[in-house]
Amino acid sequence: MSRTLERVSLAIEMVAGGLLALITLTVVASATSRYLFSYPLPDAFDLSRLLMGAAVMWGLASVGFRGNHIKVDLLSEFLPPRLRRWVDSFAWTVLLGFTCLVAYRLAFPVMNAARSGEVTMELRLPLWPFFAVIWLGVVVSIVTVFTRLVLVATGRGNLDDFDPIEIPETKQD
């Protein structure tokens, strides 16, 4: 089970990373063509902002499983392990509720954009596929947050799980 969850998490991170790479390529290509040829890439701004929204939501899905976000646990730090698990479970339940609400609210712009035929300004690309990728990131976040909630509630995970900062050792001669 753990290996499967790790693979799914890695796949989610690859999607988020791929979206960030697309943003980078779009911005660099647009800036380069603007300054070298006095011709910016059409819709570069729209594409980069839509891809940024998707990258953020897919990043939220990764954080939802790994729990590698900034957390302040001053209260729960001093609680006994059993009570701390209840507090952590409550926190993940609140996050799950928030994520479900975001997914619900984002479904409407996806449907409206598909129905109305909204397009980008210059290339006339339909907006709904971009909105759908953003919404799908939130839906995946629901799954990852729920998975983390189950792990925390059953005592197989907590908010202490994190990747430590690795400081390279220096050689002393």
Image (cartoon, rainbow, N blue to C red):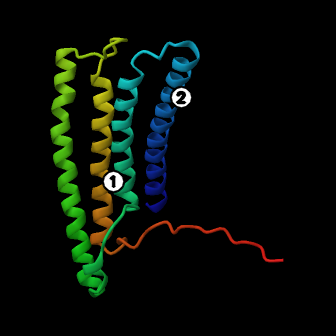
**Where 67 falls versus 31 (above or below)?**
below
Counting the numbered discs, the total is 2
Look at 33% across and 75% down and name the residue there.
155
Residue 95 left/right relative to 124: left
At label 1, the amino acid type is: Thr
Element type at mark 1: helix
Residue farthest to the right?
173
Judging depth in this view, the residue of 31 and 11 nearest the camera is: 31
- Residue on which disc 2 sits: 28
The quarter of the picture where residue 138 lies is top left
Look at 49% across and 51% down and name the residue there.
7
At label 2, the amino acid type is: Val
Quarter of the image containing the N terminus? bottom left
The quarter of the picture where residue 124 lies is top left
Residue 166 left/right relative to 82: right
Look at 47% across and 17% down and name the residue there.
41
Residue 102 pos. (x, y %): 19, 45
Look at 39% across and 47% down and name the residue there.
59
Q: For the residues marked 2 and 1, what is the alpha-carbon distance in whole angstroms?
A: 32 Å
Quarter of the image containing the C terminus? bottom right
Q: Earlier in the sequence, mark 2 or mark 1?
A: 2
Element type at mark 2: helix
Residue 161 left/right relative to 152: right
Residue 80 pos. (x, y %): 28, 88
The answer to the question of whether label 2 and label 1 lie on touching residues, with beta carbons closer than 8 A, is: no
Residue 168 pos. (x, y %): 66, 68
- Residue on which disc 1 sits: 144
Q: Nearer the viewer, mark 2 or mark 1?
A: 2
The quarter of the picture where residue 148 lies is bottom left
User: For the residue carrying disc 1, how many other residues have a C-alpha within 10 Å: few (<14), some (14-19), or many (20+)?
Assistant: many
**Where 103 falls versus 5 (above or below)?**
above
**Where 69 falls versus 88 (above or below)?**
above
